[in-house]
Amino acid sequence: MSMFTLQNKNRLKSYVAEVLVSIHNFDASSVNQIVEQSAFSKTLETDPEFVFHYDVEYWAEKVKNERQKSRKLALA
């Protein structure tokens, strides 16, 4: 059985969301949408083996940085 099952992918997304809320103070009501729209989620679908080489904190940091960058661009 592959470790890249839908259940494992969803679990990883959930863990990333939890870290974003608990450590990076993201709003719990919108964090799942942020994670779903991130490059992390797209990469998880196209190259799960790559994603699973890194830990949850790494991906939470990437999502946080991506979100900050997009918000700065929106304000410019």
Image: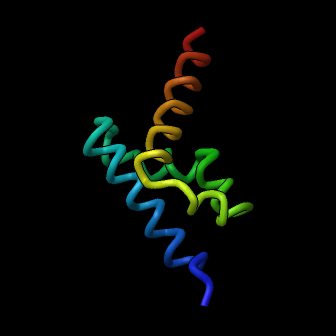
Residue closest to the eye, 66 or 30: 66
Residue farthest to the bottom? 1
Residue closest to the eye, 51 or 29: 51
Residue 20 appears at what percent x and percent y?
Answer: 36, 44
- Side (left or right) of 33 relative to 18: right
Q: Residue at the location (60% across, 76% down)?
A: 4
Residue farthest to the front? 53
Residue closest to the eye, 46 or 50: 50
Residue 64 appears at what percent x and percent y?
Answer: 46, 35
Residue farthest to the left? 22
Residue 63 appears at what percent x and percent y?
Answer: 51, 40
Quadrant into which the N terminus falls:
bottom right
- Side (left or right) of 57 relative to 41: left
Q: How is the image coloured?
A: rainbow
Residue farthest to the right? 46
Q: Residue at the location (67% across, 54% down)?
A: 42
Quadrant into which the C terminus falls:
top right
Residue 57 appears at what percent x and percent y?
Answer: 41, 47
Q: How many marks?
A: 0
Q: Residue at the location (54% across, 69% down)?
A: 9
